[in-house]
Every structure is written in C-alpha cells, then in structure tokens.
Amino acid sequence: MRLANIANRATLVGPDDQIIDIATGSGGRFGTRIQDCYERWDELLDVIADLPVTGPGLSQVPLTDYGSPAPQPRQIFAIGLNYADHAAEANLAVPEELTVFTKFVTSLAGPYGTITLPPGTVDWEVEMVTVIGRGGQHICAEHAWDHVAGVTVAQDLSERSMQLSGDAPQFSLGKSFPGFGPMGPVLATPDEFEDPNNIALGCSINGEPVQSGTTADMVFPVPEIVARLSRITPLLAGDIIFTGTPAGVGIGRSPQRFLQPGDELVTRMQGVGEMRHRLR
C-alpha cells in the first residue's frame, strides 16, 4: 500500500497509480488529514480494500499538490552516524549506542518546490524516514516492523556552521530551518518491499550523483532503532524517525562542498520515487 498527501487530502495510491481519496471513498469515515490515518492505522487497513477509485492517475497530479506524507508528527527522532561509511568520512567512530537528536516540526516540507538557504554552509543528507503506525513502549526488535506504517525518503538538510558551533554542537537547531525536512512523495508500507531492511536510496545535485547507498548498511537497522527508542520513551502513532545517511555529504569531501542558490537537489528511494527541490 502507498499513501500520499495530495492537495492536503489523505490519498491511497492504487496498484496502477490511480489515486483514491480516502475521505470520499470511505463515505466520511475518515477525514482529509493524512496524519489522522496513523492514529487509526488498524481501522484504515480494514477499509482500504473497499475504497473505490475516485481520481486520476498519479502522473496527472501537479507537483505543487504534493505535501509531506507525515506533516504533523508529535515526535521526531533522528539518528546520527548510522552508516559506517558516513562515520568514517566524519572521522568519528561507529557508535555503539544510538546517536539521537530531533528536528523541529516546522522544518518539515513536501517533496517538490523551493527551499531557501539561510546564511552559512548548508549540506545534504538523504535518509529513509519511518512513520509509526502502531505506537508502544518496550517494542521488541522481532516485531518492530509491525509497528511501522511505512517508509518514505527525506532530506536531513543541515546548516553545518550552526550545527558545529560552540562547545556543545547544536544539531537540532542547525537541522531545523524551514524546509530542512522535505519528505515524500509517497509513503510505502513495509510489504511493498521484497526486503524492507535493504532499500536503495541516493541523491544528486544538478544531475551529478553525490550519495548512493542501501539501508542494509545501517549500523542500527530499523527494528533495532524502534526497539532502542521505545525502551526510553513511548513511540506514538504518526511519529517519524530519520534513520541516518550514507557517505557522500558535502562536509566530508575534499574540498568541502555545500548547496548553492540555483542548485537542483534530486532525492530518490526505491519503491517511493523521487523528490526535486530548487535552492534559492
């Protein structure tokens, strides 16, 4: 199953890329907000099989109509240094425990459009995001995928000057400017993948590939992330987790490279599609 947030309406994407408006198709049983679908995840799964096709094909949807597939989470978790090759390019040891920070909800954005660069050095980080569908605490890794509604692709954009300023790094502030958490275009449930622990992802700038990896290379795979986070705090339906980035970021290059006005950033993930953003 694939979900999208189209024209601020929760939408199911059919097997032939036909779009199904969930509020209309369910006879008003569900509202228009996609975030509410996660709060009622099991109920949604019960009704989707009977939803009629009510809209055009996905290719006919204007890019400006797409929004984030999880725009109002109550909690945002982000995992740092979760790929060994990224830790190596940062000259840091592979962590033995989760490195966790947050991005503020106002940084979230849709999969297409323009992102304004603040002063400083803005870097790219392609990431898989997981969205929680069934909350819980003390979730065991063996059953963690049962708690995940789906996955999508995102950018954890980072203004490195602020992030690394001072004696204590400002990870959350440096990664939370408006537009610094674009996600989409669709959210795919785990059963859409032959192996949800091995999904290819990458990004390019002005047509030049800069990152390419697979989630199979995570230090802490999704089930372990869910298990470890839920030992500390309850995970809530609709929460999102940025799961880390592979090597290839700008700060790890020699010479270093950062996003510039006019750049086009294209971000892609197997089974989800691609995002396109112009920097200004």
Image (cartoon, grey):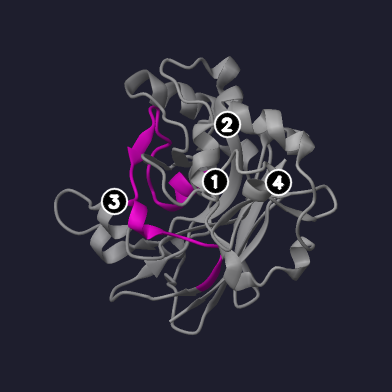
* Residue type for callout 4: Gly
Give SS at disc 1.
Answer: loop
- Residue named by callout 4: 25
**Residue 261 located left or right of residue 168:** right
- Give the mark nearest the N terminus, 3 or 2: 2
Give SS at disc 4.
Answer: helix
- Give the mark nearest the N terminus, 3 or 1: 1
- Residue named by callout 3: 172
Q: Please determine whether, in this image, residue 268 is positioned above or below residue 35.
A: below
Is 47 in front, or is 207?
A: 47
- Residue named by callout 2: 41
Give SS at disc 3.
Answer: helix
Q: Residue 90: within the magenta?
A: yes
Q: Residue 47 lies in what quarter of the image? A: top right
- Give the mark nearest the N terminus, 2 or 4: 4
* Residue type for callout 1: Gly
- Residue named by callout 1: 31
Regarding residue 204, the answer to whether it shows in the image is: no
The CA distance from mark 3 to mark 1 is 32 Å
Q: Position of residue 121 (x, y in %)?
A: 34, 71
Residue at 60% from the left image edge and 78% from the top image edge: 206
Circle 3 crowding by C-alpha within 10 Å: few under 14, some 14–19, many from 20: some
The CA distance from mark 3 to mark 2 is 29 Å
Give SS at disc 2.
Answer: helix
- Give the mark nearest the N terminus, 2 or 1: 1
Q: Residue 61 lies in what quarter of the image? A: bottom right
In the image, which residues are magenta?
Answer: 85-113
Give the quadrant of the C terminus.
bottom left
The CA distance from mark 2 to mark 1 is 13 Å
* Residue type for callout 3: Ser
